[in-house]
Image (cartoon, rainbow, N blue to C red):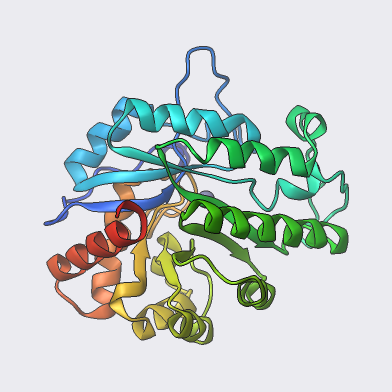
Amino acid sequence: MSAKKGRSTLPPIPEPLPVPVIDNHTHVGTDKPGQVQKVDDQGNPRHPLLIEGQVAAMARAGVSRAITVGCEIPDLQDVIDLARAHPEFSAAIAIHPNEVPMHAGVREMGPDGLEPRVEEHHRAFGLDEAIGMVADLAREPEIVAIGETGLDYFRTGAEGKRSQQESFRAHIQLAKELGLPLQIHDREAHEDTVRILLEDGAPDRTVFHCFSGDRHLAEVLTANGWYASFAGTVTFPKNEDPREALRVLPAELVLVETDAPYLTAHPHRGRPNAPYLVTLTVRAMAEILNVPIVTLCQQLVDTTEVVYFR
Ligand SMILES: [Zn+2]
C-alpha cells in the first residue's frame, strides 16, 4: 500500500547540477484562482506541484528556467500569463496534434483504441479558428516557440492524419512568419514528419521534442541542422534507440526536457514529473556520452540560448 502511495508522489529533489540548465519543453499547472485541476485516468492531479513549489524545486536542483507549453485552447492564455508572472518561465503555444482531429470534427479511433474525448472547446472552435487563436497570441513577447505541433499516428486514423498534416503545415508557416523556433511532436510518424518539413521548408530552428527516433532519424536531423530534445525516455533501460541517436548527434543539436507531468526519468518512472527532475536526464546523458557533467550542462545551456533566447 505504501509503495502504491509512493508512486503518486513527486520524487525527491536530486543533487544539484554544477551549471544550471533549462528545461526546454514542459507542461506545468498555472494555478489560476478558480481553475479546475485536471486529473488523469487514475484521478491524480495532472500537475501536482503548484507554481511556487516548482520554482523552489528548480532553484534547489540547478534548473534555471523552463519553457512551458500550452497546446489546447484552454491553456493558451494561461501559459502566457504564467510566463509574464514568473521570470523562470517562457511559453510556447500550438494546437497539439491530438487536439487537431477533434477541432476538425473527425470522430474516429486510432491504433491506441481509445474513444476520442470531445470537449466543449473542440465543439466551439473549428480547426482554422483554433490555429488563428494561436497565431494571434503567438505575437506576445512571452512566446519563444510554436509548439507542440506535428503528427501522432498512434492516436488517430486516416481522416485524422489528414487534418494533422494540414495543421502541421499551418504551424510551420506560422513559425516562419514570426521567426520563431518550432517544437515538433512526432509519434510513430517519422517519415511523414520529415517529408512535410522538407516539402514546406523547415523553420531555421526546428526541434524534435521528446525525440523518439533512432540512429537513422538522428542522421536526418544532423544533415538538416534540426535539433533533438531528449526527455526521460532516453534513461529507460530497454530503450536503446534514443541512446544510439544521442551518441551520433553533434553536441550543438542536442537539447533536454522533461515533458512533465509525464515520462519521468529512471529510476522514478511512473511517478509525477516536473522541471526540477530534468537533472536526472542530464546526468544520464552525460554517462551515455561519457563527457563530464559540467561540459554537457554548458553545451545544453548554450544550445538552448541559441534556439530560443537569442
Ligand atoms: Zn509536451
Q: Quadrant of residue 11?
A: top left
User: Please, is residue 130 above or below residue 181 in the view?
Assistant: above
Q: Position of residue 246 (x, y in %)?
A: 38, 78
298, 197: nearer the viewer:
197
Which residue appears at 24% of the width and 47% of the height?
63
Q: Quadrant of residue 299?
A: bottom left
Query: How many discs mark residues in the rendered view?
Result: 0
Q: Position of residue 275 (x, y in %)?
A: 35, 45
152, 91: nearer the viewer:
91
Which residue appears at 63% of the width and 65% of the height?
187
User: Please, is residue 97 above or below residue 292 in the view?
Assistant: above
Is residue 57 left or right of 39 when viewed as pictured? left
21, 54: nearer the viewer:
21
Q: Quadrant of residue 135?
A: top right
Which residue appears at 86% of the width and 64% of the height?
158
Outermost residue toward the top in this view = 34
Q: Which quarter of the rendered picture does the C terminus lie within?
A: bottom left
Outermost residue toward the front in this view = 177
Q: Inspect this view and state whether residue 236 appears.
A: no
Q: Position of residue 210 (x, y in %)?
A: 48, 62
User: Please, is residue 91 above or below residue 248 in the view?
Assistant: above
Which residue appears at 45% of the width and 73% of the height?
226
240, 5: nearer the viewer:
240
Is residue 188 left or right of 246 when viewed as pictured? right
Q: Inspect this view and state whether residue 226 appears.
A: yes
Q: Position of residue 197 (x, y in %)?
A: 61, 72
